[in-house]
Image (cartoon, rainbow, N blue to C red):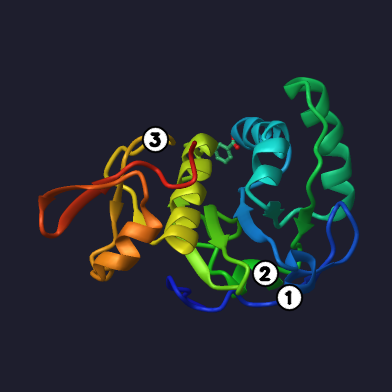
């Protein structure tokens, strides 16, 4: 199944290292990061899952739950988690789906047969509390993802969702943001952005990040 931005993230029931996951119910009112990796006991994946564990507080501060997936079985995940904890100096604190029957991989199109016939690529989906897919990225097996970039995108998505601003290229938390073009009512602009804004062009209006003091 091909997923696109704005689609409803498919629901599923699958086993994981933290018990059976009923995906939509497990997400609840949270945002979600669902990401696949090619295989257990591989070096890049070991670092990625360690990084995710270390970002627990950052994800929690953003009301985000992380969940990983590979097509390895549950007993393999449990053995590998010991290695991740040991080598990455952390404790895996999120579920790893055991998708040996490829149920979730196929729902989310995580197996790209011309890259590898049987293993998942590095797919990553950000899902909002309405269960809509808000970001899709796909990396090859040999390139570990930048999880600081994942946090940056979550910050941007949440600013758009809750404050009607977008974020410019290379934006980092704390930089000025862009008032979305659809927002034209001067009273609403004044109310939403009491710190003021700068009109560079009618379509390019900058304002300090609204949720920062
Ligand atoms: C890794 O996670 O290290 C990896 C997995 C598959 C291919 C290449 C690297």
| Callout 3: SS | loop
Q: Looking at the image, which residue is at 44% across and 36% down?
A: 173
Q: Nearer the viewer, mark 3 or mark 2?
A: 3
In this rendering, the count of numbered labels is 3
Marks 1/2 in contact by CB < 8 Å: the verdict is yes
Image-quarter location of ligand 1:
top right
- Residue farthest toward the left in the current orientation of the protein: 201
Q: Nearer the viewer, residue 159 or 96?
A: 159
Per the rendering, the mark at residue 12 is: 1
On the picture, is 61 further left or further right than 138?
Answer: right
Q: Is residue 153 above or below residue 31?
A: above
Ligand 1 within 8 Å, label 3 CB: no
Q: Nearer the viewer, mark 1 or mark 2?
A: 1
Q: At which x and y percent is residue 46?
A: 68, 33
On the picture, is 189 further left or further right than 128?
Answer: left
Q: Nearer the viewer, residue 148 or 89?
A: 148
The reply to whether residue 144 is visible in this rendering is no
Per the rendering, the mark at residue 104 is: 2
The reply to whether residue 148 is visible in this rendering is yes
Point out the tag, 3 or 1, that comes first from the N-terminus: 1
Q: At which x and y percent is residue 169?
A: 27, 43
User: What is the crowding at mark 1: few (fewer than 14 residues within 10 Å), some, or many (at least 20)?
Assistant: few
Which quarter of the figure has residue 110? Answer: bottom right
Q: Which residue is mark 3?
A: 172
Q: At which x and y percent is residue 49?
A: 68, 38
Q: At which x and y percent is residue 6?
A: 45, 75
Q: Nearer the viewer, residue 140 or 157?
A: 157
Q: Is residue 147 above or below residue 9?
A: above
Whole-angstrom CA distance, mark 3 to mark 2, is 33 Å
Whole-angstrom CA distance, mark 3 to mark 1, is 34 Å
Q: Looking at the image, which residue is at 49% across and 47% down?
A: 155
Ligand 1 within 8 Å, label 2 CB: no
């Amino acid at each position: 199944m091909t997923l696109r931005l704005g689609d409803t993230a498919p629901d599923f029931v699958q086993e994981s290292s933290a018990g059976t996951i009923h995906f939509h119910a497990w997400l609840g009112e949270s945002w979600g990061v669902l990401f696949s990796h090619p295989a257990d006991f591989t070096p890049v994946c070991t670092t990625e899952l360690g990084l995710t564990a270390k970002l627990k507080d950052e994800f929690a501060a953003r009301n985000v739950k992380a969940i990983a997936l590979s097509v390895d079985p549950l007993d393999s995940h449990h053995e590998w988690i010991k290695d991740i904890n040991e080598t990455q100096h952390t404790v895996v604190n999120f579920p790893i789906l055991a998708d040996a029957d490829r149920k979730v991989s196929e729902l989310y199109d995580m197996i790209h047969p011309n890259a590898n016939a049987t293993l998942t690529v590095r797919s990553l989906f950000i899902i909002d509390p309405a269960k809509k897919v808000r970001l899709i990225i796909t990396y090859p097996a040999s390139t570990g993802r930048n999880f600081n970039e994942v946090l940056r995108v979550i910050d941007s998505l949440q600013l758009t969702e809750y404050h009607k601003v977008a974020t410019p290229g290379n934006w980092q938390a704390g930089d000025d943001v862009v008032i979305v073009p659809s927002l034209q009512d001067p009273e609403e602009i004044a109310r939403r952005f009491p710190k003021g804004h700068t009109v560079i062009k009618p379509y390019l209006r900058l304002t300090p990040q609204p949720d920062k003091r």
